[in-house]
């Protein structure tokens, strides 16, 4: 599920033959959540299965145009069954392998995490409101970092569907991991300052002051000490994670880490940012700029790329130009 150069429409691309990709469906306009961009995890659209997609629509008020409806439909079909609709805004959603869906909505005093399963909608957790802003309202991470390098807002199931995680970081932070039944998962009490999370296999990887850590079976250990990764994504086959990180001069690089060995490789050199796996073999990313103390590099979440974009072949170690300008979701989901 991507956007293509010259358009803000979400399309479904079949990349089975990478040399001859085909557009096989559409999913409406790329949704901008409060101007933060369609790359926000679970905000714009998502695959339910290989044949179905879901996306947000409707709105709760004309000023912010916040969505209040979650739709689900076949990739090639036109009906759009309503999954969730109410008078509160729906921010994020994620599908479990069994067809149930978790979603985050506004509440009178903050946010509510819901799970809809078997026709029953229940509140899994009640959370404080999340606030995010620029350097005028919160400390910036450093002279060679974009403030958005630290912002994160994502909801995710573990690949086996037994755990669900929610991370939010901005002016205030929270990080929670729950079982499907709603109990707080073990080993998560110390994760209040964690951010930039991603599931791979049965493990949850995240960023904190020590670097990249991993929560596995209730125990936290360090995978990449001192590394400050940005918006990581797991490979569909599991075992690898792609991420952005900045060098000492503030230039972004794209890296892939093997989670079993900890081996890291740099793809494409400096000036590459916001990567995502398209398939187990191909990684998409865009041209990125250095964060210079004199010029800065913006304060916004990633959106539709305006500059050059590329696809990297992990087998041939080659980089080619791409017409894709953002990657919203891929199928199969990470294993």
Image (spheres, rainbow, N blue to C red):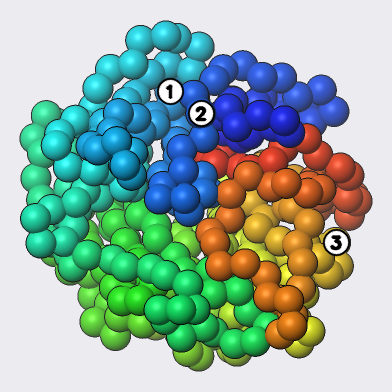
Above-or-below relation of 292 to 57? below
Vertical side of 299 occupied by 179: above or below: above
Q: Residue sitting at 39 percent across and 29 percent down?
A: 54
3 vs 2, front mark: 2
Q: Which mark is residue 29?
A: 2
Q: Position of residue 194 (x, y in %)?
A: 39, 78
At x 51% / y 49%, what residue is drawn? 37
Query: What secondary structure is found at the residue carrying circle 1?
Result: strand
**Residue lying at 46% horizontally and 43% vertically, measured from the top left:** 32
Instruction: Work out whether mark 3 precedes mark 2 in sequence or the reverse, and give the earlier one.
Output: 2
Residues at marks 3 and 2, CA–CA distance in whole angstroms: 30 Å
23 to the left or right of 138: right
Task: Relative to 64, say whether 13 is above or below.
Answer: above
Q: Identify the mark at residue 52; answer none if there is no mark.
A: 1
Q: Secondary structure at mark 2?
A: strand
Mark 2 and mark 1 in contact (Cβ < 8 Å)? no
């Amino acid at each position: 599920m991507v956007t293509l150069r010259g358009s803000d429409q979400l399309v479904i691309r079949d990349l089975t033959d990478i040399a001859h990709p085909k557009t096989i469906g559409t999913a409406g306009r790329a949704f901008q959540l409060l101007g933060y961009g369609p790359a926000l995890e679970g905000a714009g659209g998502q695959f339910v299965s290989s044949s179905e997609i879901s996306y947000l629509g409707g709105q709760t008020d004309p000023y912010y145009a916040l969505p209040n409806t979650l739709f689900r439909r076949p990739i090639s079909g036109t009906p759009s069954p309503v999954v969730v609709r109410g008078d509160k805004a729906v921010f994020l959603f994620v599908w479990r392998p069994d067809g149930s869906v978790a979603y985050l909505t506004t509440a009178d005093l903050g946010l509510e995490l819901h799970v809809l399963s078997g026709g029953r909608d229940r509140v899994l957790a009640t959370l404080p409101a999340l606030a995010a802003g620029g350097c005028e309202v919160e400390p910036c991470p450093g002279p060679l970092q974009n403030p958005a390098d630290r912002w994160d807002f994502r909801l995710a199931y573990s690949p086996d569907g037994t755990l669900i995680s929610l991370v939010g970081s901005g002016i205030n932070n929270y990080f929670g991991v729950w079982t499907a039944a709603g109990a707080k998962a073990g080993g998560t009490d110390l994760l209040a300052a964690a951010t930039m999370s991603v599931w791979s296999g049965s493990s949850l990887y995240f960023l904190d002051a020590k670097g990249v850590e991993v929560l596995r079976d209730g125990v936290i250990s360090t995978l990449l000490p001192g590394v400050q990764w940005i918006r990581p994504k797991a490979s569909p086959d599991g075992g690898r994670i792609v991420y952005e990180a900045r060098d000492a001069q503030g230039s972004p690089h794209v890296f892939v880490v093997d989670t079993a060995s900890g081996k890291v490789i740099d793809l494409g050199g400096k000036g590459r940012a916001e990567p995502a796996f398209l398939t187990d073999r191909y990684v998409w990313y865009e041209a990125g700029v250095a964060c210079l103390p004199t010029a800065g590099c913006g304060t916004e979440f990633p959106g539709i790329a305006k500059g050059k974009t590329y696809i990297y072949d992990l087998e041939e170690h080659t980089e080619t130009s791409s017409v894709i300008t953002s990657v919203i979701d891929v199928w199969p989901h990470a294993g």
